C-alpha cells in the first residue's frame, strides 16, 4: 500500500513512521509512506498557508490554494482515496480501518489551526476523526490511522491472527494476557491457561472479554449478539 500524508509539519512523522512495525513494513516493501510539506506549495512570498476566516471568529484557517496545489502534485493523474483528518469526521473504527487497508493507495490531509477552507472538501472522499475531542492538528490522528490500518495488511504483523484477536476486533475488549513465569511475586497465571485444553481456554477468554467490556466499556455490549454468534461458531 502507498500512503501519502499532506501536512504543515512533516518532521513530526519521522520517528513514528521509521520505528518498530511500521519501519519494518516499509523496509520490506509492504508499505510505502511519504510525507509532503503543504507549505512548499504556497504561492505567496512568505509561504503563508493560513488566514483569518471570513465572517470573523477566533483563530486561523488553512488556505485552499496550497492544499489544492499540493494535492494535485501528489496525486498526479491517479485518483487515490483522499481522507481529511478532522474532529467533525466519522469516528475511526477497526472495521473502517480494515476496509481502508484493502486499498492500493490513500492520501491523508492533516488539518491544522481552526480547520481548512471548506472548498478543500471538493477534493476529499472522506472525513475521519479518531475521537470526540480536539487536537492541535491532524498529524497525530494521521499517525493513528496509519498504524491502525497497517495492522490489517498481510505481512505487516508477525502473526496473521494478531489483528483479528485484539480489542474491538469482534466488538469486545481483549481478554487478559499472561506470559512466563507462571508465578511472579505471589501473582499466578490462571490455572485454566496452563492445562492446554483449547476449548476451555477459548470459553474462558470469551467470558473474560465480556466481563472486561462490561466493566470498562458497557456501551460496546450492544454488539453482544453478533459477537456471541461469532464465538459459538468456533
Image: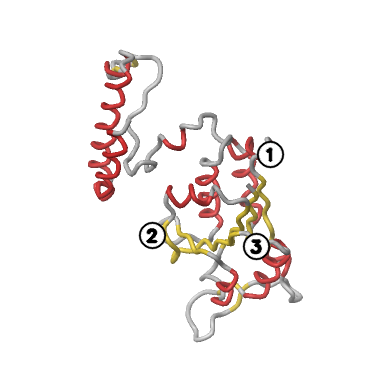
Which of the two discs, 1 and 2, labels the residue nearer the N terminus? 1
Residue 83, horizontal then vertical, whole percent: 55, 61
Residue 131, horizontal then vertical, whole percent: 41, 56
Task: Tell me how far mark 3 sits from mark 2, CA to CA.
Answer: 30 Å
Task: Tell me how far mark 1 sits from mark 3, CA to CA.
Answer: 22 Å
In the image, which is nearer the foreground, mark 1 or mark 2? 1
Farthest residue in the right direction?
45
Mark 3 nearby-residue class (10 Å; few <14, some 14–19, many ≥20):
few
Q: Secondary structure at mark 2?
A: loop
Task: Tell me how far mark 1 sits from mark 2, CA to CA.
Answer: 34 Å
Kindly identify which residue carries mark 2.
132
Farthest residue in the bottom direction?
55
Which of the two discs, 1 and 3, labels the residue nearer the N terminus? 1
Residue 187 location, quadrant: top left
Left or right of 43 in this view: 187: left
Kindly identify which residue carries mark 3.
79
Kindly identify which residue carries mark 1.
29
Q: Secondary structure at mark 1?
A: loop
Give the residue drawn at x 60%, y 55%. Answer: 106
Quarter placement of the C terminus: top left
Mark 2 nearby-residue class (10 Å; few <14, some 14–19, many ≥20):
few
Amino acid at each position: 500500500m502507498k500512503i501519502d500524508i499532506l501536512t504543515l509539519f512533516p518532521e513530526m512523522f519521522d520517528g513514528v513512521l521509521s520505528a518498530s512495525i511500521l519501519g519494518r513494513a516499509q523496509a520490506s516493501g509492504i508499505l510505502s509512506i511519504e510525507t509532503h510539506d503543504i507549505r512548499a506549495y504556497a504561492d505567496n512570498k512568505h509561504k503563508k498557508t493560513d488566514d483569518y476566516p471570513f465572517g470573523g471568529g477566533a483563530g486561523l484557517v488553512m488556505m485552499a490554494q496550497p492544499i489544492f496545489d499540493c494535492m494535485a502534485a501528489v496525486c498526479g493523474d491517479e485518483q487515490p482515496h483522499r481522507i481529511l483528518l478532522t474532529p467533525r469526521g466519522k469516528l475511526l473504527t477497526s472495521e473502517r480501518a480494515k476496509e481502508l487497508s484493502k486499498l492500493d493507495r490513500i492520501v491523508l490531509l492533516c488539518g491544522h489551526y481552526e480547520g481548512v477552507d471548506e472548498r478543500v472538501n471538493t477534493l476529499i472522499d472522506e472525513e475521519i476523526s479518531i475521537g470526540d475531542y480536539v487536537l492541535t492538528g491532524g498529524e497525530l490522528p494521521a499517525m493513528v490511522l496509519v498504524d491502525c490500518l497497517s495492522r490489517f495488511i498481510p505481512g505487516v504483523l508477525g502473526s496473521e491472527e494478531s489483528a483479528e484477536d485484539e480489542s474491538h476486533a469482534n466488538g469486545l475488549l481483549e481478554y487478559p494476557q499472561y506470559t512466563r513465569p507462571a508465578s511472579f511475586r505471589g501473582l499466578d497465571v490462571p490455572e485454566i491457561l496452563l492445562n492446554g485444553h483449547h476449548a476451555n481456554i477459548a470459553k474462558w477468554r470469551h467470558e473474560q472479554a465480556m466481563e472486561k467490556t462490561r466493566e470498562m466499556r458497557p456501551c460496546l455490549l450492544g454488539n453482544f449478539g453478533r459477537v456471541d454468534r461469532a464465538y459459538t461458531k468456533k
